[in-house]
Amino acid sequence: MQLIEETPKARFVVRAVGPDAVLVNDRTCRASLIVAPNQLIEDWRHAPELTPEDLHPILALAPDVILLGTGDRLRRPSITVYGYCLSRGVGIEVMDNAAAGRTYNVLAGEQRAVVAAFMLPAQAIA
């Protein structure tokens, strides 16, 4: 049986997730970041407690769903953040960074309009 390695359909693929870094393709990102199938935004600035304004660069990518990775454990954002997304017709799923990376790869591979945002510990700004 011949096996053919499938080439990812997304330009940006999450290869690994660690406690303080995310490997996207061959680039190690140590600051919070946003990944879409065709765009990588490094050094995403966000408040320690996520606000609707922090979502502007994510929503500018016009996703159907946002995967919010909140670090090594699940940290739910305020109800205001959920409402802000839903009022714009965008779903938001909150999970730890490892789960966000896995889920992003599956949805991006299905050519879905998905954006993953990874919150890394050293990057939150006041």
Image (cartoon, helix red, strand yellow):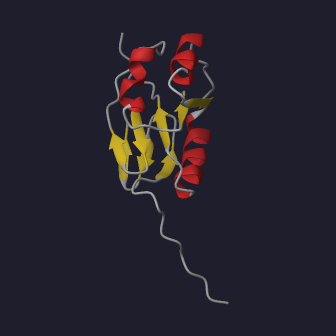
Note whether residue 122 is visible.
no
4 or 124, nearer to the observer: 4
Asked whether, in this view, residue 44 is left or right of residue 63, the answer is left
Asked whether, in this view, residue 88 is left or right of residue 54, the answer is right
Q: Residue at x 47, y 16 (%)?
A: 50
> Which quadrant would the N terminus be assigned to in this image?
bottom right
> Which quadrant would the C terminus be assigned to in this image?
top left
Horizontal and vertical percent position of residue 51: 45, 14
Horizontal and vertical percent position of residue 16: 50, 49
Horizontal and vertical percent position of residue 70: 54, 27
Q: Residue at x 60, y 12 (%)?
A: 79
40 or 97, nearer to the observer: 40
Q: Residue at x 47, y 33 (%)?
A: 118
Residue 25 picture quarter: bottom left
Q: How many marks?
A: 0
Residue 29 picture quarter: top left
The single residue placed furthest to the right in the displayed view is 1
45 or 80, nearer to the observer: 80
79 or 5, nearer to the observer: 79
Q: Residue at x 42, y 45 (%)?
A: 36
Note whether residue 120 is visible.
yes
Q: Is residue 32 above or below residue 125?
A: below
